[in-house]
Amino acid sequence: MFYLHIPKTGGQTLARRLASAFPPGRSHLQVGQFTYPADCAAFTDCLAEHDFVEAHVTGQLLEDRPVEDLLVTVREPVAQIISNFRHIRREPDRRLSRAARELDPGAFFDHFGDFFTNFQTRYLLSAFLPLGIEEQRRGYWPTAAHHLPKVLDKIRWLLPTDRIDAFVPLWEAETGRRAAERGFATNHAPADDVDLGALEAAIRARPGLFALDSVLYQYACARHAEWVAAVQQQVAPWDYPSNASRVFHDEGGGVWLRSGWYPSEETAIGPGNWAGPSRRSDVAVKRGPGQDALVFDVIVINGITFDDITAYTAEGFEPLPIRREEVSRDRWRYRVDLSALPDSCSVALMVPNCFAAINVFGDGEDAGLERRSFLAAGWGLERMAAASRPASVQEAA
């Protein structure tokens, strides 16, 4: 396992915690840094001799080097710049230390901001490719846009710094290891006389300093959330439970509302659920004998039409045949054909937009702030006779 430690992202604390999950002598915590190309052989030996390695790197040491278990932490970018600035300011041997101490923050970043601009993204990319040469050839933004997605795909754990405390127990659950120093913390910045308000204001007034790092950080947050959900699923697998998410159960089959639904509320035809706040709402299905159609009634719509509700497979996002019929005024019945899917499957119901009532209804009408698209009730599974199935998805729409 290799922890590519981007400076000022909480790495020493995390590295010490993770290192304690490996036998004595099998972990390497950073001392200095590995530099390309001088330290290529030393870096190779270090990875071979240890189960866990944490290090700063300079240059493309990871280029063409497969590292299966790669960990990278990413910090909220303004906080990372502040931490980096304060570190430089209190270290008199650093080139920019005097400038950081004597200039006001605005003047400092106007003159030396290129040393801080998207520091985390640059550091990450430079570990995999000769960034300077690529920037000269393509330009900075085209280089980042071209290479960053491929680099991100090489990372197993992309961790926002502010999730470190919660990460270690989940990492233990995923890997089966146990950290002996789960609560270890170090390298807290000492007190200084920096005007943090003025420093933050100067940074935020120059969004170019952290534009791409903001994208990287938001992506890290989203991907980490997906990883957390996957580990939780591993620890406590979802197994078609008898709980509040189950809206239908009969003859061995059942329907469960997963993500993208509001809590149940009473309607004129029994319990119902609003879809929202996202455009996509997922439904898990376990089919019993003869149950090849997912059935539900839509009794209220919000800012969309009844024809706007479409169905897809949740995994491959393939369109599913769907038949709509008007049962009564303001009540439509939907049948989604599941006959080509496994008995246990998931369906994504999609709408073009999901509005808040305040954006849809006029003055004096119900103007809630929750973003909702349609209210569904009457969930069930039944047989969809072959003659009633739409000939194609296009015809059904």
Image (spheres, rainbow, N blue to C red):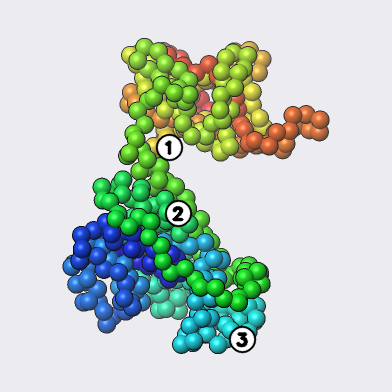
- Secondary structure, mark 2, is helix
For mark 2, what is the residue? 163
Q: Could you say where residue 4 lies in the image, as x and y percent from the top left?
A: 35, 66
At label 1, the amino acid type is Phe
For mark 3, what is the residue? 102
Up/down of 215 relative to 172, above or below: below
Q: Are marks 1 and 2 in contact (CB under 8 Å)?
A: no
Measuring 59% from the left and 13% from the top, which residue is drawn there? 269
- Secondary structure, mark 3, is helix
Q: Could you say where residue 47 lies in the image, as x and y percent from the top left?
A: 22, 67
For mark 1, what is the residue? 317
At label 3, the amino acid type is Glu
Horizontally, is 108 left or right of 220 in the view? right
Measuring 61% from the left and 38% from the top, which residue is drawn there? 353
Q: Could you say where residue 329 lies in the image, as x and y percent from the top left?
A: 66, 15
Mark found first going from the N terminus, 2 or 3: 3
At label 2, the amino acid type is Arg
